[in-house]
Image: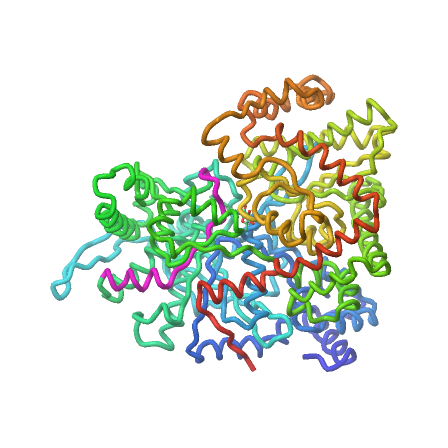
Amino acid sequence: MFQSKEQFKLIFLQKLQMMYGKRFEDTTVSEQYHALGQLVREQISAQWIETNEKHRTCKRKQVYYLSIEFLLGRMLGNNLLNLGIRDLCEEALREIGISLVELEECEIDAGLGNGGLGRLAACFLDSLASLNLPGHGCGIRYKHGLFDQKIVNGYQVELPEQWLTHGNVWEVRRADEAVDVKFWGEVEAYRENDHLKFRHIGAETITAVPYDMPIIGYKTSTVNTLRLWNAEAAPYPTHKNVLQYKRETEAVSEFLYPDDTNDEGKILRLKQQYFLVAASLRSIINSYRKQYPDLSTLYQYVAIHINDTHPVLAIPELMRILVDEESIPWDEAWEITTKTISYTNHTTLSEALERWPVPIFKPLLPRIFMIVEEINERFCRELWDIYTGEWDHIERMALISHGVIRMAHLAIVGSHSINGVAKIHTEILKHREMNDFYVLFPNRFNNKTNGITHRRWLLKANPQLSTLITDSIGEKWITEPEELRRLEHFADNYSFKEQLMNVKQKRKEILASRIYNQTGLKIDTQSIFDVQVKRLHAYKRQLLNVLHIMHLYNKLKENPNYDIHPRTFIFGAKASPGYHYAKKIIKLINTVADKVNHDPVISNILKVVFIENYRVSIAEEIIPATDVSIQISTASKEASGTGNMKFMMNGALTLGTLDGANIEIGDAVGKENIYTFGLTSDEVLNYYENGGYRSTDYYHHNKPIQMVVDQLVNGFFPKTGTEFELIYDSLLVQNDEFFVLKDLLAYIPIQQEVGRGYGKKSDWYRKSTLNISKSGYFSSDRTIKEYADGIWGLSKVLVK
Ligand code: 26Q
């Protein structure tokens, strides 16, 4: 690596000149960014090769993490940090008049994910490499990541995201490792040595070309690989209409699908899933074969993890390879497959469980369909032996029923480990949603509470807080996050808390000036920053948050002397383009913002900000500036949540329901250091099972609730007409499926308590300190160690 600032400057200026053929003074910031990126990539190439060599020859188990999403965000700052050269570069660049931060801001986020599931995959890659574990990601190189969001007149408008238009310095195209993936066509049976065999004929072939990205561990020599597949036309297409074939082929890796469970059955989405799986398995097996003679020992050296059911076709695809290509008998192939594959579930929402109609699936993937049918038949026969005569029971558990394939059932039957992502979520899976399977395979179910990489979300995103922490307890926490616990001793240290307060203040000012520059809105940095940023979903209940703001507005209108600490309510959220209800909520937030921010009296006390185009890089600015982290999903609905952990680690206090990982955050910090409220998950699930909730009761018996609900439709918001009828109806006509009105009743007083709590600064920062000190458990380093030990059987491989 670079020996000194002077050496770095020399190499950097040379690089810049070589790449752009200009004098340094004439280069743009974007060119400087690309030159620095290029330089970093060249610097790590030796370590990357070394890691690959080591993994190729070490005869140790490797894990491949298959995910339809990797929400990486920006890479430059993180890579510099992990290489341990960020400070050196920053100073050297400053000396030649360049701001590193400005360069970093040139980088467009790699937004190849919707939210939690995709970001989790990215955090896992960082932890795998930092822990020297041989673990690699397999995903799709979408040409367009999640759409860019514009807010026009309060409405969300989507634009295609364009992260690749200026090239991507972090990827290497490996054309020599391209593989074929087959769709359509027919299956032909034939005899070979008296065995019945099958081959796929008349198929349409797509070429999958890998683009590899280096995943650099924190101050280690390990550089793992994220392999993203690009769909391209086969070199010599035999297709009748070559242009059409080319267009259809490239469409496979063109767009990331937005998370929209209402919009099922899109054939392109299924194509993407099989494309990822078939290309990844081919490449995994190719590299396995370089070390080992046959596939009978595959599971001893390879673990394949599927991130939700999106890559579940890895199960029948592996069976196809073992049975059709390797001529391994079915039973042995099945044992190899189930011992190789493990599965994480990320949802209990039954409408979000993937199902594919047979009429879509079968023609696209004819051989895979036959294998799924065979798995189903054998499984149902086993069930028949156990539950003889119980047709309903068997039908409930079948993989194929009423003409649809249930992907979660395939995942459970075909893997040796099934995990949920927070304790309560795993319990709900075991005892409710997947109970039939838990009874049958109790040992397969386990919990792995999610985590986040504290290096991106604390060390990189919040250098001010990181410095304070390191000054207080040393820097061991960076590689051993549980060390943060030692901050406990500072909970009553006046000087520490004052510095913590100053750090928070500084970050609030940075965010406030960003908001001012982008929107012209002036926000009070002495106010409480109350933040809810996450995908927009009915179950996440941004609506509960807005109705509470409307309530505060009403209270202040009624009594301008109403005693309340000034607040800034900050939202960031993308709604799936076809999810009308979610889009109405965005319009409502912006409508309330308009009303509140333009009221001459109220706007001195309350402000509402909707931050456009929420994404990883914006999260890195918002989270460190947050006082109150809003985590108010309907209990039982949020599998885990990971934003909650990022806020906690940055010293925000959580205001949340007893849902997902909020419960474990509460257990870690103690109930004095978190604000919880609302229905419990048992109460919610009991209502769903037995009925008994009547939203109109809450409406009729509570004036403040009635008032805000009526304001949705009674002209309170000028010129909105019937705009919010959908929301109004969801609350009163559809009986408020997510218990917004009932929980609003509890939310109002707990928010008052938060306001009072914030007034007592010393106490508030005591709580804040304790939250940071207990956040080490929520590092993905801990999570990944649990996966490595408990599921994958993986151990460290040190690279020299
Ligand atoms: C499905 C079908 C068609 C198109 C898209 C999709 C799709 C895409 C993405 C369905 C779901 C997702 C993403 C789900 C997700 O992010 N789940 C979250 O996972 C986090 C990590 O475990 C948890 O913390 C969250 O609680 C969970 O909501």
> x, y (%) of residue 98?
80, 66
Across and down, in percent, residue 579 comes to: 55, 34
Q: Is residue 719 above or below residue 186?
A: above
The reply to whether residue 28 is visible in this rendering is: no
Q: Residue visible at 34% across and 43% down?
A: 405
If the image is split into quadrants, where does the N terminus sit?
bottom right
State whether residue 523 appears in this view.
yes
**Residue 469 or residue 371, whichever sits in front:** 469
- Does the stretch in magenta take in 335? yes
Colour mode?
A: rainbow
Give coordinates of residue 540: x percent, y percent.
60, 39
Taking 781 as reference, is 570 left or right? right
Foreground residue among 495 and 362: 495
Which residue appears farthest toward the left when viewing the image? 194
In the image, residue 252 sits, relative to residue 320, either above or below, namely: above
The answer to whether residue 344 is magenta is yes
Residue appearing at x 57%, y 77% in the figure: 47
Q: Quadrant of the C terminus?
A: bottom right
Q: Which residues are magenta?
A: 330-351
The number of callouts visible is 0
Direction from residue 613 to residue 335 in the image, left or right:
left
Q: In the image, residue 286 lies at what x, y percent?
A: 38, 70
Residue 783: image quadrant is: bottom right
Residue 85 as seen in the image, left or right of residue 296? right
Identify which residue is drawn at 23% across, 60% down: 330
Which is more toward the observer, 349 or 59?
Answer: 349
